[in-house]
Amino acid sequence: MADNVVVARNTENAPKCPMCSQTVAFSHYNNLSAQLPVDPKTGAIVEGGVKEQAEQCFRNIAAIVASIDHDLNDVVRVTIFVKDIMDIDVVERAYRSFFTTYVPARTIVAVNDLPMGALVQVEALLTNGEGTIPNEPQAGDLVKYANNTHNAPFDAMSTQSVAFSHYNNITAQLPIDPVSNQIVMGGVQEQTAQCLKNIKAVLTAMDVPFDDIVKVTVFLKDLGDVEAMNEIYKRFFPDSGIARAVNYLPARTVVEVADLPQHALVQIEAVCSHGDGTPPQAVEARHGLIIEANNIADAPKDELSSQTVAFSHYNNISAQLGVDPTTGVLVAGGVKAETEQALKNIKAIIESVDHVLEDCVKVNIFVKDMNDMDAVNEVYAQFFPEGTPARRVVGVANLPMGAAIQIDAIFGNFEGTPPIA
């Protein structure tokens, strides 16, 4: 079988950006760039308030999806960023008008800033049933599995888990007790434990082990709570004796946000492997895939995450700061120097597993000052001169170590993980 290739595409019916592609497909997923409420004809934010802006974001996503011969039922995850958490109800009304029957997995957070001063930004992850091996469909029309369990909080606006091909996408879990449907009593530690219990319940309902998680994103209201959160996190990872024996830890991103639904202190999102795949994949292409985690000395190490976790045809990279791995401290020189170092760290990590930057399909940028983005883009363009990867940019008030920028990424893994040839 030939290798998968990165397929980047753009349409005139959605806003274009020189720094990213609207959609980047690799294997069985399309990664869409986060969409702002920009009218593609004018290049400006649409007039009106959050309602009009949300509708435009979803129109842009629908246009991109239609341009690659897919539809909104192929969306497996939606991530919504708002400036004001009180706008969620308005955004959800727009959301429901686009997802009228099936609802994907979902994450909602309020952030401190968005590009162009937007009130809302929406991102989508899309299936790609035909795969991206040139002239060779990989598995025909794969089936999407949506699953809910009473043992985790139910939300009519999202599905708890959506599996497609070899990945499960878990709706971001709030610290809600599924029995009472209320935020649990206590502080960030009690809330972290409940978030992780909810994720575990979702996975258990599908007979998926907790240690099949490949990437975790932790959204905290207060980054000062990170140590307290980590104390609980360490009780859940690694989960099994086998995982503890090799100290397997998922890739991870931790980011402070302005607010969370129901004013929770923490919300946790997980992406999980799905080793048996979704039908009609051939049996020999479905069984026995392994998770491959890797760490190197040439990039900063974190005791609570792996630098890269590969499964099937994707590599998931932990969030990188502008930290010099030889000193363990942020590089001097401000946002440009930190951006360069963060991207150097990502480059070192992906090259350590015999891949290159051109295999990147998605980049997520968290920046403390949105006014720094011109400087960030100047450096970014040196690493991604073709502007190929899909991209997300959000503004945050605080980052670990007082950093100015934090970047995580997803790369294609064309050879797959064993026993894929």
Image (tube, helix red, strand yellow):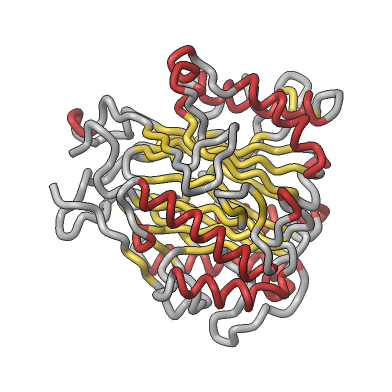
- Direction from residue 76 to residue 107 in the image, left or right: right
Above or below for 268 versus 21? above
- Direction from residue 193 to residue 205 in the image, left or right: left
Q: Is residue 207 visible to us here?
A: no
* Front residue (pair 100, 372): 372
Count of labels shown?
0
- Direction from residue 256 to residue 378 in the image, left or right: left
* Front residue (pair 344, 150): 344
In the rendered image, the residue lying farthest to the front is 327
Residue 317: horizontal and vertical position, in percent? 48, 47
Q: Residue at x 45, y 51 (%)?
A: 410
In the rendered image, the residue lying farthest to the top is 241
Residue 66: horizontal and vertical position, in percent? 40, 65
Q: Is residue 116 visible to us here?
A: yes
Residue 15: horizontal and vertical position, in percent? 53, 77
Residue 50: horizontal and vertical position, in percent? 75, 66
Q: Which quadrant holds residue 384? A: bottom left
Above or below for 207 versus 146? above
Q: Residue at x 24, y 53 (%)?
A: 4
Q: Residue at x 80, y 31 (%)?
A: 188
* Front residue (pair 325, 25): 325
Q: Quadrant of the C terminus?
A: top left
In the rendered image, the residue lying farthest to the right is 186
Q: Residue at x 21, y 55 (%)?
A: 133
